[in-house]
Image: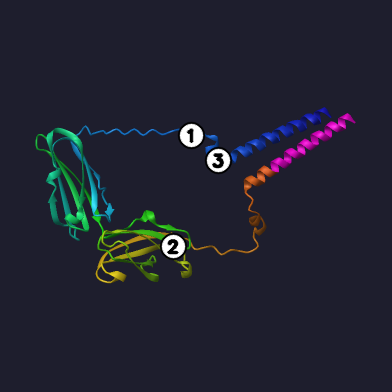
Amino acid sequence: MQIAKKQLLGFGGLALVVAMTAFATTLPTGAVSGATGDVEIVVQVYGINFETVINAPKDGDIYSDSKVDFSETHSHAYEVNYVLQQLNADGTVAKEWALTEYDVHGTDVSGNTNFTLDLNDYGGTGVYVFRSTITSETGTTKEDAVQFTYAAIDADQADVKTDGTKVGFKVSYTAGIKSVAYQLRDANGNFIGDRYVTNTPTPATGGTLNLSIDFTSLNLPGGTYTIYIEGYDGLDASGDLIDTASVKFDYTAPTPVTPGTGAIMSALNISRADYLITGLIGFVAISIVALIAIRRSKRN
């Protein structure tokens, strides 16, 4: 009887330890970990070599705001010159502006140059190249260059959200865009569903639009779709087409629901952690009852 009692005591203790461990695993990580603060230390380091690096804009950036920030870092310079170029459709230079008011002159100078330009004061919308040229004491030069776009309308891929029934996206537009039209296209470029048109709320200054397309009635197969966007200088998509943009999204067609499979357990809405904890509590309770029964049996 003593051996059986010791076995049951050990069994009950083991069950209790398992129950406590299982409960601990269900706690959020933040509940068992201490918070630590982050300290941000910013250190400006200039290159040991003779060089110029353009920090902004980034190569390939697209802007719908005419005001663009420019930033360049130079090391061991005796002169730094900046040039802004607007390109033709074939990539050749259409116009060029020497930004002499921002040039750097000195002796072995290392530092940053930062300024903002309103591209409406230059060539307006289009594709641009920003160049920085650095000159050494001996007349040696080095150059850095980036290409970016000032678009009349733009839609960022990062803003596209879909919940399976509709897709939402954001369109930025410049001053002068009075209306925006948009429509779905499939992977082959075919238009799907209705063509939507909305007038911009602030055509005089430019701004943003939060738009969406409901595709629940279209019975779309799964795949990748494109939202084609057009910007016009007249209301209700009238006047001249000023610019276009597009974004993509992936759509997964819903799987047909098969009735009668797991309906009871789904209706109960019980998680795996609930099953585990309930089972362990029952196991411990049975062990305690067994110990009490053994004790009473021993007294008898």
Q: Quickly name the residue at label 2.
A: 223
Is the magenta region chiefly helix, strand or loop? helix
In the image: residue 5, left or right of residue 59:
right
**Three-letter amino acid code of the residue under disc 3:** Pro
Identify whether 219 is placed above or below 132.
below
Q: Quickly name the residue at label 3.
A: 28
The secondary element bearing badge 2 is classed as strand
The quarter of the image holding the C terminus is top right
Who is closer to the viewer here, 135 or 169?
Answer: 169
Could you say where residue 59 lies in the image, as x and y percent from the top left?
A: 26, 49
Q: How crowded is mark 2: few (under 14 residues within 10 Å), some or many (20 or more)?
A: few
**Three-letter amino acid code of the residue under disc 1:** Ala
Instruction: Look at the image and give the residue range highlighted in magenta.
Output: 279-300
The secondary element bearing badge 1 is classed as loop
The quadrant where residue 7 appears:
top right
The quadrant where residue 5 appears:
top right
